[in-house]
Amino acid sequence: MPYQLSLFQDPEIPNIVDALLSREDCVLAISISGGKDSQAMLSWLTEQRKRRGWCCQVFAVHADLGRIEWTQTATVVQSHAENHNIPLVVVRREKGDMINHWRQRYQTLKAQGNTKPFWSSASARYCTSDLKVAPIDKYLRRYPLSVVAIGLRAEESPNRAKKTRLSYRKTIISTKYKDLPFKEAIKQYNGKSRLSLNWLPIQDWSLDKVWNQCGTSTEEWHRRRGLPDEDAIEGWPAHPAYVLGHGNHRLSCAFCVLADVNDLTNAIAYNEEVYSELVELEKESGWTFQHNRSLLSLTNK
Ligand code: SF4
């Protein structure tokens, strides 16, 4: 099918993406975590699909990291997909969940002398690549042509701000495309070699815009964070972790190697078993969960 320029000039949707999503042989995979950003993105993309008449196949994809997830996350992602009538695909790492992977990495490094931390970190982000990217890629490989929508926002970190809004999904595209400009790659696409793009549709969105798209507001989120749990979650349209206890800033693994103190301490009361298991692993290994912060220190004051 020839590459066609879109009639739409919406700056939030590159023409190339619009043209791809208007093809029946393309797939739009919307990556969702249960957090507010992917919830807002899913909602917005569903609106755009209707408005623009995209005829590509669409599904949401969630990488389930196992016991480290908030217990509510599986139900939340399911409801996000159902609310928009979008099929949900859940993928998992076959060799064990996040906690297993940390344990396996510890055993490997212990056998080598235990001289470096086994926990993942900003500079050793194997948790994301092995538990999220790789299982999603494994699923996506069945599709010759895909656009993967990812709900990263520039406001969240300098790293995310630097990311390119549209890029090749290098982990799965055929090498014949990787050095070509997008237009040329699409022109050369013949259905035989895999072509896949990563797209960050809400990269420029503000926090207010995200909460509004989720059906609430930043003010309401803050208000609910001060309420008793029962009142806080009554009618709340997003993941409960944002308002339970003192309310998370972000939704990630219940205990994330990059989380702030607010989110780590908030997770403890709702994920006690996992907390104890990770503290035991800190004690056994001698390595703290984050570079300058142990999980144990959060309750050991
Ligand atoms: S949420 Fe945190 S710990 Fe979990 S995969 Fe992402 S960076 Fe790693």
Image (tube, grey):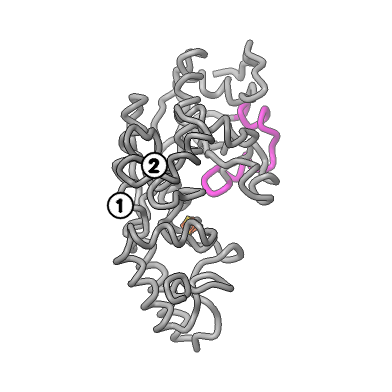
| Residue 242 relative to residue 156: left or right | left
Dot 2: element:
loop
Residue at 39%, 67% in the rendered image: 101
Three-letter code, disc 2: His
Residue 72 position, x and y percent, is 31, 47
Q: Nearer the viewer, residue 234 or 241?
A: 234
Q: Which residue is mark 2?
A: 239
Q: In this rendering, is residue 279 above or below 36?
A: below
Badge 2, how many Cα within 10 Å: few under 14, some, many 20+? many
Three-letter code, disc 1: Thr
Question: What is the quadrant of the N terminus in the image?
Answer: top right
| Residue 290 relative to residue 67: left or right | right
Residue 40 position, x and y percent, is 48, 32
Residue at 51%, 23% in the rendered image: 21
Residue at 62%, 14% in the rendered image: 6
Q: Quadrant of residue 62?
A: top left
Q: In this rendering, is residue 239 above or below 43?
A: below
Which circle marks residue 14 in the picture? none
Q: Which residue is mark 1?
A: 71
Can I make out residue 39 in this image? yes
Residue 41 position, x and y percent, is 50, 32
Badge 1, how many Cα within 10 Å: few under 14, some, many 20+? some
- For the record, the magenta segment spans 170-188
Real-space CA distance between mark 1 and mark 2, rounded to the nearest whole angstrom? 11 Å
Please tell me whether the stretch drawn in magenta is mainly helix, strand or loop: loop
Q: Earlier in the sequence, mark 1 or mark 2?
A: 1
